[in-house]
Image (cartoon, rainbow, N blue to C red):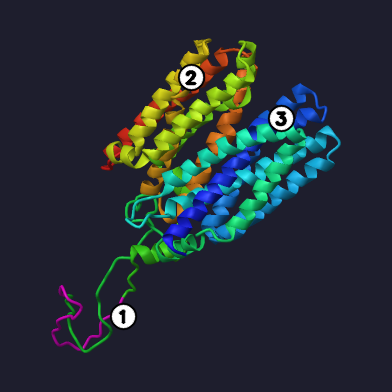
């Protein structure tokens, strides 16, 4: 597939798939409430929905790294998501509503690491990465379909949430047929280690010797060329020891080659950088769950709340557009550190701000919370993690940031009784601040190992 068409198909998929999230994240609770479910139960369902991806993301990413069938896995996950959405119309009990919500959040999030791997692999004609442009389309899709779904609900009722979510999933299934996913499998088979990520994948290699086959020679002394010089003798030399190049060792499984997840966990700087970036992303938990209710209690109307979301997404889009220039001037690790500091400032500001104008000012910092942090961790993983472990690394980040850590952050707010209080944002500021010493340690460790952070 031509590079231009491949890039357009990836942009289209991200636009539609993040549009699916723009429909389900804000409005699935509305649909559940329309079915007469108790608000407390709806809250439990939404909080628990962050957990299934903790299991699914690493499982399917590991399967993709080992098996290499990205297209098949993505289409299976999309079909399972669509099937679960359709079953929502037949659910009658709380157990069914809970189970189906868990199913959707088991299958759909597992697609993202596979797609991020494809986006990272795609290059422009000049060889530059297209990831930030592709991810930008996802942010636009989230905003467009979130607004569209609100209009649709006003027109046809809450069932529009399920219908639009199902339509977007079906559109993704169609588009997945033409995505440039075969290139990933070919690249994986051709080279298991990227030149700038060899320290993550470091398979054992045999010692290279140039001993010739048995001949009536006495002492075979290898020269700089492949032709040995010889001194006559009657004693034959042993047969040559096969040479294993790094590429051959990495592409051919051996007993000493570790599984992708083990490779990531054993590289402490890489692992803790992932953890730090995941903490920054997970600090969105209060925004995604209770912020709108808190703002309503402050007296803001739904139009003003919608504008606050739009300001944040707009800032995120702008920084994604500037990604190439930003990453050319600041390293990924330093950008993660800057994003963590700006995110902590954002949440601290929203904790005390009561004026919509002040809130909008702090919402601009979403550019760092989402765009800056996301493009930095993806650039870091592209540079530091080899091809055979990269999908697993992305899945680990997704599992922690949008799964385990976000679940813990939301439930910490609940445990402290701050669900509808500005102090919920303060808890998120603490979550983002916790990332700073971790990323600083990772940067220092890389310097000690001789790597530039």
Mark 1 → mark 3, Cα distance in angstroms: 71 Å
* Left or right: 439, with 370 as reference point: left
Q: Are marks 3 and 2 in contact (CB under 8 Å)?
A: no
User: Outermost residue toward the right?
Assistant: 92
Q: Quadrant of residue 53?
A: top right
Q: Are marks 1 and 3 in contact (CB under 8 Å)?
A: no
* Left or right: 151, with 97 as reference point: left
Q: Residue at x 36, y 64 (%)?
A: 247
Query: Which element carries disc 2, helix, strand or loop?
Result: helix
Between 193 and 224, the one lying in front of the other is 193
Q: Residue at x 65, y 47 (%)?
A: 168
x, y percent for residue 268: 40, 39
Taking the magenta stretch, the answer to whether it contains residue 231 is yes
Q: Which residues are magenta?
A: 223-240
The residue labelled by disc 2 is 360
* Left or right: 228, with 426 as reference point: left
x, y percent for residue 23: 65, 37
Q: Residues within 10 Å of mark 2 (few under 14, many from 20)?
A: many
Q: Residues within 10 Å of mark 3 (few under 14, many from 20)?
A: some
* Of marks 1 and 2, the one in the foreground: 2
The residue labelled by disc 1 is 239
Q: Is residue 49 visible?
A: no
Q: Residue at x 45, y 35 (%)?
A: 317
Mark 3 → mark 2, Cα distance in angstroms: 25 Å
Name the N-terminal-most of marks 1 and 3: 3
């Amino acid at each position: 597939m031509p590079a231009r068409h491949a890039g357009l198909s990836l942009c289209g998929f991200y636009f539609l798939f993040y549009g699916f999230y723009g429909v389900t994240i804000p409005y699935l609770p509305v649909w559940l409430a329309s079915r007469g479910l108790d608000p407390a139960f709806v809250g439990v369902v939404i909080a628990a929905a962050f957990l299934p991806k903790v299991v699914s993301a690493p499982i399917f990413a590991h399967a993709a790294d080992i098996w290499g069938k990205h297209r098949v896995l993505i289409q299976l996950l999309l079909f399972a998501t669509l099937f679960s959405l359709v079953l929502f119309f037949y659910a009658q009990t709380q157990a069914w509503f809970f189970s189906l919500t868990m199913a959707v959040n088991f299958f759909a999030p597992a697609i993202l690491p596979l797609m991020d791997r494809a986006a990272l692999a795609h290059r422009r004609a000049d060889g530059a990465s297209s990831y930030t442009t592709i991810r930008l389309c996802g942010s636009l899709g989230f905003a467009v379909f979130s607004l569209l779904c609100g209009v649709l609900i006003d027109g046809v009722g809450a069932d529009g949430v399920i219908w639009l979510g199902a339509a977007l999933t079906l559109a993704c299934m169609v588009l997945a047929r033409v995505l440039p996913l075969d290139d990933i499998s070919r690249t994986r088979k051709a080279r298991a280690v990227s030149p700038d990520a060899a320290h993550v994948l470091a398979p054992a290699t045999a010692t290279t010797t140039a001993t010739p086959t048995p001949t009536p020679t006495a002492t075979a002394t290898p020269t700089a060329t492949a032709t040995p010089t010889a001194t006559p003798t009657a004693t034959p030399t042993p047969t040559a020891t096969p040479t294993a190049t790094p590429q051959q060792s990495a592409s051919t499984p051996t007993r000493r080659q570790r599984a992708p997840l083990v490779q990531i966990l054993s590289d402490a700087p890489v692992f803790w950088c992932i953890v730090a970036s995941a903490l920054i992303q997970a600090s969105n938990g209060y925004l995604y769950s209770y912020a709108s209710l808190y703002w309503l209690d402050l007296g803001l109307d739904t139009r003003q709340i919608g504008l606050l979301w739009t300001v944040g997404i707009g800032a995120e889009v702008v920084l994604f557009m500037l990604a190439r220039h930003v990453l050319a001037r600041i390293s990924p690790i330093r950008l993660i550190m800057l994003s963590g500091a700006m995110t902590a400032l954002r949440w601290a500001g929203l904790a005390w701000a009561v004026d919509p104008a002040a809130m909008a000012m702090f919402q601009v910092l979403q550019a760092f919370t989402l765009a800056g942090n996301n493009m930095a961790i993806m650039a870091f993983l592209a540079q530091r993690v080899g091809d055979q472990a990269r999908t697993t690394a992305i899945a680990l980040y997704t599992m922690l940031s949008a799964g385990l850590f976000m679940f813990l952050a939301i439930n910490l707010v609940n445990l402290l009784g701050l669900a509808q209080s500005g102090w919920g944002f303060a808890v998120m500021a603490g979550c983002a601040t916790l990332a700073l010493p971790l990323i600083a340690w990772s940067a220092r460790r890389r310097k000690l190992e001789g790597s530039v952070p």
